[in-house]
Image (tube, coloured by chain):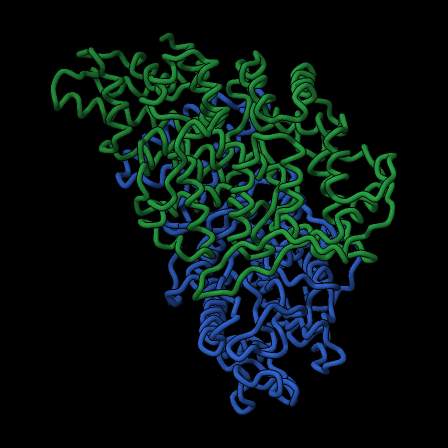
Chain colours: A blue, B green
Amino acid sequence: MAKNGKSPTLVVVQLSGGNDFMNTVIPYSNGLYYDNRKTIGVPEESVLRINDAVGFNPNAAPLKELYDLGRMAIIQGVGYANSSRSHFRSMDIWHTCDPDKIATEGWLGKVVRRLDPEKSNPLTAVSIGRGLPRALSAQEVPVTSVADLDNYGLMSGFSAEQQRADALDLFKRIYTPAIGTAAVTDYLARTGIDVLRGAEMLKKAPAMYSSNVEYADNPIAKSLRDVARVHLADLGTRIFYTQHGGYDTHANEAPTHPKLLTDLSRAIADFYRDLEEHDAADNVVILVFTEFGRRVQDNGSGTDHGAGGGAYLIGNHVRGGLYSEYPSLEPGKLENGDLRHTYDFRGLYSTLLEQWLDIEPTQIVGGKFEQLPMIAV
Amino acid sequence: MSESDRSLVAHLMQRAGFGSSVEELELLASRPYEDVVEDLLHPEKFPPVEEDVLRRYYLELNNADTHVAWQAAWVYRMINTRRPLEEKIALFWHHVFATSVGKSEHTPSSLRQIETFRQTGLSDLRTIYIALAQDPAMLFWLDNCENHKGEPNENWGRELLELFSMGVGNYTEDDIKNASRAFTGWTFTQPLPLDPYGRYPSQFLYVAEDHDDSPKTFLGRTGNFDGEDIIDIVVEQPATRRFISRHLYNFFVADEPQVPAWNIVPPQDPAAINALDKALKDSNGDIRSTLRVLFNSDFFKKARGRRVKSPVELVVGTVKLTGDFRFPDPGLANLAVAVSVMGQALMTPPTVEGWHTGKEWIDAGTLNERVNFAVNLLADHGKPGIKSIIDHIGKNEATVTPAKLVDRCIGILAPLSVSPATRKGLVEHARQGGPIRFDSEKARARSAALAVEVLQGLVSSVEYQLA
């Protein structure tokens, strides 16, 4: 239990496309880094040093501040054996915890099933964006996906308030009697009423929210602001999911990757500050992950798909520091030119499940994996 | 033309195609049902969709790798084709032989695969399986390009038997190994270079020196089998006919449990499966003949409302009703995105198992998307399709009662039928606005608005999610 008396909550930030770990946490004292990164290497003098070996990309300065406060854990070399270089497949593996066969249920979907077995709260998990990530999908587990928090829910196309109210009223009138009918129509009707309930609850969030924090105007900042608004409305959400796209930097990495890191770091720092100002940070841990790292050697413009990468935990109950080992850059120790993973991501999930959400992880991640002491409750 | 004829042919068009506009339905309902079935079964009698028009107005398509644009182009075909079953059967095989562009990231090969499904989809199983086994998108998706003499990769061999033809329990692990060896040397050419010359699909390539020529034992027979021999044996298997029969039933007739459950859960209508099985057997695996039996059967005609519409069926069916996108208008890509966020990103199925169908299409997020999409699409009274619907409702009458207005709207959405409770809710809603008159321009406009509200209520209903 967190110090503010509220239930532990997980905010997931998915970096889609494969974030370049080597240019995020930079092994600046290793000559091999500069040998391999002739085009997009970050000069040693601008690296924000963590220790004698590694440091943050200068565009991630807000994260460095969180790190210096002891609130951020960096999991180096996270991944899995025989890493898939396909975005789709690798993301799928991170979502379902199954590297061997293509599974259908997501790890967080199973978590929601444990957190709310009675399906009493349609907002137990909230995903910001349209469509549901595989991580959150599990059969008959209600999850709410919110594309636009200020205009969420059914009949959102009506601009006139009265018209929308009438349409919602009609919807309720025709969905309610279908509850308790045949299996399929009953399920459809219950789902429809859940959407109404979820929307009714979520409507409060924008109205209740006020903050001194000014988020930047970019997609990840908007998404995390939406998370803050829902979290602060105290609607019982335990899992939040957001995505930040554009990390597939095959070309022109030099201008694009710094922009991504700038947007991401500032958004996370603003989000964290927003929660702190409202005394609502204490029960939140943020997980930032990506489907893979990128090729050690740059291709003259960017980097191709790699293997081992990095993940990050941020929060008041996170024991800050560097975890696992930075994968070796020695040519003989690479996996087809990529960083070999040094820590299995399912251990990271197990850590979060057992140490933070208080859920037995074995079933969810598909086995026992080494946990790291990254949470201090 | 009776309402029941109209409803039946509307049901046929919804299942064998993607629905119909009010006018199309009028025409079709005046013809004998069996003739409409024959037209569907013979797409070659009708002109194809003119893709060059699409390319001229939809410039993204000139770069073959714009995946969303090509998803939209397929949706456009579904809306406008005069060969509805050609597109529907391509979608059927896409469900069964689920291949995702997400792994190859090579759109031209995925497009080629769908085109192959269009061209071969109504032919016989042998032709279909051979085309599939030689399809570059499939060869890459299931790693047959990594299946070498002396170093077999069993991914394709396994899925051919487990997910594409016979289903688990009908073969052994040794059969998989031997089948896989028979497909060694079946690979593809590297696709042609990248921009600025455009990208082209790769081609099937048989590499004789990479083919394992030694004897193999497969399903009890022994020989120097090549891939074609394996397919010859596979199509003779009763398990294959039964598996395809169940797929046809699940896709065209009524929702069954998900495929992996089929060896445990028996079919809900064994007689129907037997009839399809027999049709396949009698015709040497001919899909056209089997669908003729299916569409003309009582079990099909009675199956109205027994399936949850897939997202693309919901989107295209609703668009057809409004008369939108009869031309490559701006916003076409939004339709593809709508289909994707409802959970059916075309050419991007989640796994090789394909999409989970039936009620698994529905969760809070997808239902929200489905309802809002349909309601928003109907909002514009000026659309040609909506105009003709209103004309139809107010036809020959100065006033209509709320109940009659609702019933006419339901009739327009044929083969939709709604529960008494849904109807009651709609009638109550229609009653709130006073008399429903069509005898002056002003009254007509008000009544049209009310009719649209009722239609919006109907397309958001539980029943509209079903087909």
Q: Quadrant of residue B82?
A: top left
Q: Give the percent coordinates (x, y) of residue B339.
A: 46, 42
Picture layout, residue A195 above or below residue B462: below
Q: Give the percent coordinates (x, y) of residue A158.
A: 30, 39
Picture layout, residue B8 above or below residue B43: above
Residue A13 in view in this figure: no
Q: Give the percent coordinates (x, y) of residue A267.
A: 46, 67
Q: Give the percent coordinates (x, y) of residue B387.
A: 24, 27
Nearest to the observer: residue B68 or residue A190: B68
Nearest to the observer: residue B154 or residue A320: B154
Question: Is the N terminus of chain B in the top left, top right, bottom left or bottom right quadrant?
Answer: top left
Q: Residue at x 64, y 86 (%)?
A: A51
Nearest to the observer: residue B170 or residue A292: B170
Q: Residue furthest top?
A: B2
Q: Quadrant of residue A8?
A: bottom right
Q: Residue at x 25, y 22 (%)?
A: B390
Could you tell me how many numbered marks the image carries?
0
Picture layout, residue B57 above or below residue B417: below
Residue B164 in view in this figure: yes
Q: Is residue B384 left or right of residue A198?
A: left
Q: Is residue A235 left or right of residue A372?
A: left
Q: Residue at x 25, y 33 (%)?
A: B383
Q: Quadrant of residue A340?
A: bottom right
Q: Residue furthest bottom?
A: A45
Q: Residue furthest front?
A: B208
Picture layout, residue B346 above or below residue A78: above
